[in-house]
Amino acid sequence: MSGKNIRVGLLAYGAIGDEHNQAIKATPDLSLAAVCDTNPERLKVALEISPDAKTFTDADLMIASGEIDLVVISTPPNSHYLWAKKALNANLNVVLEKPMALTTEQCDELIALAKAKDLLLVVYQNRRYDSDFLTIKDLIEKGAIGEVFYFESFVGGYSKPCSYWHSDKEVSGGAIFDWGSHFIDQIMSVISSPLKSVSGLNQKRVWDHVTNADHSQVTLTFNDGVQAVFTNSDLAAARKPKYFVLGTKGSIVGEWDHSSETVTDLPAIISVFKPDGTKQTVDNLKPTPFSFHQSLVAYLLNKTPMSVNAQQSRDVVAIMQAAEESASSLGALKEPVLLRK
């Protein structure tokens, strides 16, 4: 790094690349030095925000260019391991999109390589910063519903899946990996007890044009009996709440906001239910803009620990991998090996 200027390269430029570009521009001590994509039109879009960035169509050339200190890898999931390994071997700090990789073996190798080279390896767990989730986490930590013993999250509806890589199991890892990378990470960040077992189930019943499951469910059971369930469905004509949390002194429900056609992009409407049946809708917390990218700077310049770390994201992959193994045997219980104690 040159002084306090951390030079960033974006590897693949889609919607999430644009999000990183905006964040880099708004975060002191970060600058977009390079962007790589095989589509020239996407490079043009990137330059509209950061006109001084150098453009590449060959990722190997960008990694070896000497122009960057950190690379943000936004390629499809089945290539995360490949590009992260190349970047770390080129002595670059690495931010990966979700999931970290498609197997725990790949994650463990990357973590060991980053440690050996004293480089940052972290996953952009952006859903940790969603206003609805931040609100639920804050309510739980303040004891608004007592001790939480059941946490359920749901995403989906009844719609034909897209034909992009998200719906290709070989590329995305499957329906559990696609959205589970977000929601299972959220679950693990609010439930602190040790995980006992994982059960998974995939249903393939309607959408034959893609290889992802039509409906997937993951059940996590913790040592103290706390349970969490994550469901991703393209066969849900009636949506369940986005969040449904039970505690010893009340409940939290996060209802989908149907004021827009893009329901999944809107924060849930959060309500707290008391034991007497009364309901109070609460205002969502406002997240600090670009807090993840600010924490990148704090770590790289001052070694300030980040709230998101590679071990957490690796454990999410371990859980999803165990869920897929469980699903292949119709829900048999699996015990993933986690780094978290």
Image: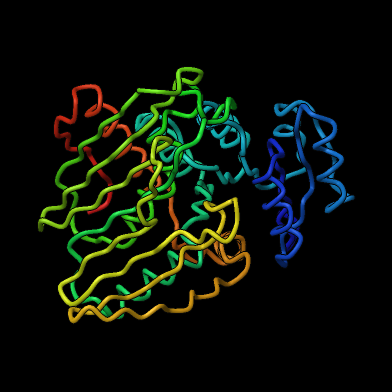
Q: Eyeballing the image, is 193 above or below 237?
A: below
Horizontal relation, residue 27 to residue 112: left or right: right
Residue lying farthest to the top in this orientation = 208
Horizontal relation, residue 172 to residue 103: left or right: right
Q: Which residue is at 25% across, 34% downward?
A: 200
Q: In this orientation, does residue 312 appear?
A: no
Q: In this orientation, does residue 88 appear?
A: yes
Give the x, y percent position of residue 302.
56, 67
Q: Eyeballing the image, is 179 above or below 326?
A: below
- Protein image colouring: rainbow
Give the x, y percent position of residue 3.
74, 62
Q: Which residue is at 53% across, 47% downward?
A: 119
Horizontal relation, residue 336 to residue 37: left or right: left
Residue lying farthest to the left in this orientation = 224
Residue 105: quarter of image = top left
Nearest the viewer among 255 and 201 is 255
